[in-house]
Image (tube, grey):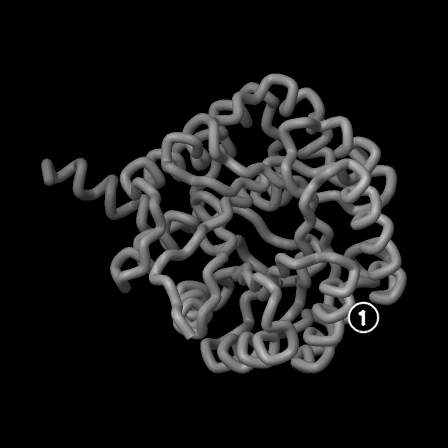
Amino acid sequence: MFRTREVTLREVGLRDGLQAEDRILPTADKLVLLDALAATGLRRLEVTSFVHPKAIPQLADAEDFLAAAHKPPGQVWSALVPNERGAARAAKADLIDEWTFFLSASEAHNQANVRMSVEDSLRGAALVAEAASQAGRAISGVVATSFVCPYAGLTPVEDVVQVARRLFGLGYRRLLFGDTIGAASPAMVRRLVRALQDALPEAELGLHFHNTRGQAPANALAGADEGVRLFDGSIGGMGGCPYAPGATGNVATEDLCWLFEAEGYATGLDLPAMAVAARTAERLVGRPLPGAVMRTFEEVSCSGG
């Protein structure tokens, strides 16, 4: 099978990153971060969420943000759409190209996260898929706890494959699989990816890693070597999951960019601009972020090259 040496990094900091921050960024600050990200060459960004504002107050300004945002030509913007109410809001957002639906492979985590059974979430996925079709929008599915659940331990591969099959049958052709608590290993990644490729050869697979144990870069590289070409990252390493005890932030997008480029995978991104965007995010959220590569750019700059 021919495998291109190009990978796509989907930036999720504006949604998955900011929703985990204690500080609620004003809309104007989010627009500053959006502009910094736009300068990097990123083509896929998850920019907001249509979850109820009381549930995620950090993203309560979704409509105001989109009304003020400038979308560069060629960028694909996605937003989290959790249910029919969210779909009704998303249908009015002309800048959003793709709706993302989220559920867990683990029953225990799905109950903690959205207070539903996995089966109930799949029924919700069907409703969102139907609404997206009516609105003429693409859809993608994200399967959390695809490797380990904070409550139930290891997630059986067959459970993940079963959820993926159900989503694919509902029309979700792009499927991303999350290491929600950062407990996966490269061997686990290879095993899951191979099972998914066997079960759903026509699906576009993506991976979403947290860096709790420092293994996210190695896990991403293992996925790429198995043929995965879509990876989530969050600028500076922002993010986390409030229903995943002990989980730290998403892997930093700029760290993935550096790793993939060093290993011969083309990302199409401007790495120095990524470091600038990470520093911008750090300044705006008002706390140190865990991304590593942005520190190296700072050190090089201070030493005069």
Crowd band around label 1 with a 10 angstrom C-alpha radius: few (<14), some (14–19), many (20+) = many
- Eyeballing the image, is 171 above or below 300? below
Query: SS of the residue at dot 1?
Result: helix
Q: Residue at x 78, y 68 (%)?
A: 166
Q: Residue furthest left?
A: 304
In this rendered view, identify the residue nearer to me: 167 or 257: 167
Q: Amino acid at mark 1?
A: Glu
231 sits to left or right of 86: left
244 sits to left or right of 201: right
- Tell me the quadrant of the picture where the C terminus can be found: top left
Q: Tell me where residue 55 sits by quadrant.
A: top right
Q: Tell me where residue 179 sits by quadrant.
A: bottom right
Do we see residue 78 in this rendering?
yes
Q: Residue at x 42, y 75 (%)?
A: 1
Spot occupied by residue 52 in the image (x, y as percentages of width and height): 81, 37
- Eyeballing the image, is 273 above or below 179? above
Q: Residue furthest front?
A: 1
Q: Residue at x 69, y 74 (%)?
A: 160
In this rendered view, identify the residue nearer to me: 253 or 112: 253
In this rendered view, identify the residue nearer to me: 123 or 274: 123
Q: Which residue is mark 1?
A: 107
Spot occupied by residue 182 in the image (x, y as percentages of width and height): 54, 66
Spot occupied by residue 277 in the image (x, y as percentages of width and height): 39, 35
Do we see residue 214 in this rendering?
no
Q: How many labels sit on residues?
A: 1
Spot occupied by residue 27 in the image (x, y as percentages of width and height): 60, 22
